[in-house]
Amino acid sequence: MNDNRFAPTRRYWIASAAALFALAGCSRIVGPGAAPQLYILAPQLQPPPDAPAVQWALQIALPEASQSFDTDRIALINPPTRMDYYADAAWPDRLPVLLRGLLVQAFQGSGKIGAVSPDTAALRADYQLMTTILDFSAHYAVPDMAPEIVVSLEAMLVRRHGRTLVARRRIEQSTEADANSVDSVVLAFNRALSEALKQIVDWTLHAAGPEASKP
């Protein structure tokens, strides 16, 4: 097979290590009723130790994304520039929805903010955090080898009163997967996303400062 997608059908394989490497990079044709294996994003949410404690409220907007990333499919890039998705594997929800929830959890877990909520909640927020998913994919430099995971986000902090831009920053993290398997790829996504979320929390709290926006 020349298809470089790795396509597991269950979270755990009943197969030998040799069979696993033989399947890596090979996609399987499934029937119309087959459901993809779901993989969760569960990064370790580490609060930034040097971020200031604030009393203002923050609203997390649904991240923007191109059609390529506004999906529950797990993206990969094959050389030189061909975008694809892992077969028979998916996130539990669209990536922007998952990322919004993780951003809320990261700020809540920091213990350094007065209040935070998604933009679906009726919170009277002082600031809104807007993000754009620029990249969230596994990059293959060589087919069938372990890929590099890239998480790239642009963040904008906006003052709710007057809709003025406070600060903007691009945050990018990358790490290499331990193996060419969806399990290893997802673990690497979680490592990269953990660091990216910590940086966003730290940057946001410093950018706005301890005082809430004034009317």
Image: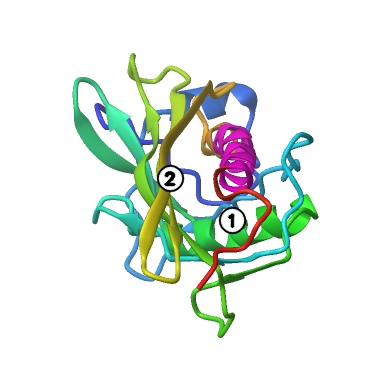
Q: Residue 196 at x, y = what percent?
A: 56, 37
Q: Is residue 104 visible?
A: yes
* Distance of label 1 from label 2 (alpha carbons): 17 Å
Q: Residue at x 43, y 30 (%)?
A: 150
Disc on the earlier residue, 1 or 2? 1
Which residue is most to the bottom?
122
Q: Residue at x 52, y 38 (%)?
A: 182
Q: Residue 118 at x, y = what percent?
A: 55, 71
Residue 115, picture quadrant: bottom right
Q: Residue at x 50, y 73 (%)?
A: 215
Residue 19, picture quadrant: top right
Q: Indicate whether 9 appears above or below 98.
A: above
Q: Residue at x 43, y 17 (%)?
A: 145
Mark number for residue 167? Answer: 2
Which residue is most to the front?
215
Which residue is most to the top?
142
Q: Residue 142 at x, y = what percent?
A: 34, 14
For the N terminus, which image quadrant? top left
Please tell me which residue lies in front, 210 or 25.
Answer: 210
Dominant secondary structure, magenta: helix
Q: Residue 7 at x, y = what percent?
A: 43, 42
Q: Indicate whether 66 appears above or below 44.
A: below
Name the element at disc 2: strand
Neighbours of disc 1 within 10 Å: few (<14), some (14-19), many (20+): many
Q: Which residue is mark 1?
A: 103
Q: In this picture, which residue range is highlighted in magenta? A: 187-206
Please tell me which residue lies in front, 164 or 137.
Answer: 164
Residue 136, picture quadrant: top left
Q: Is residue 13 left or right of residue 150?
A: right
Name the element at disc 1: helix
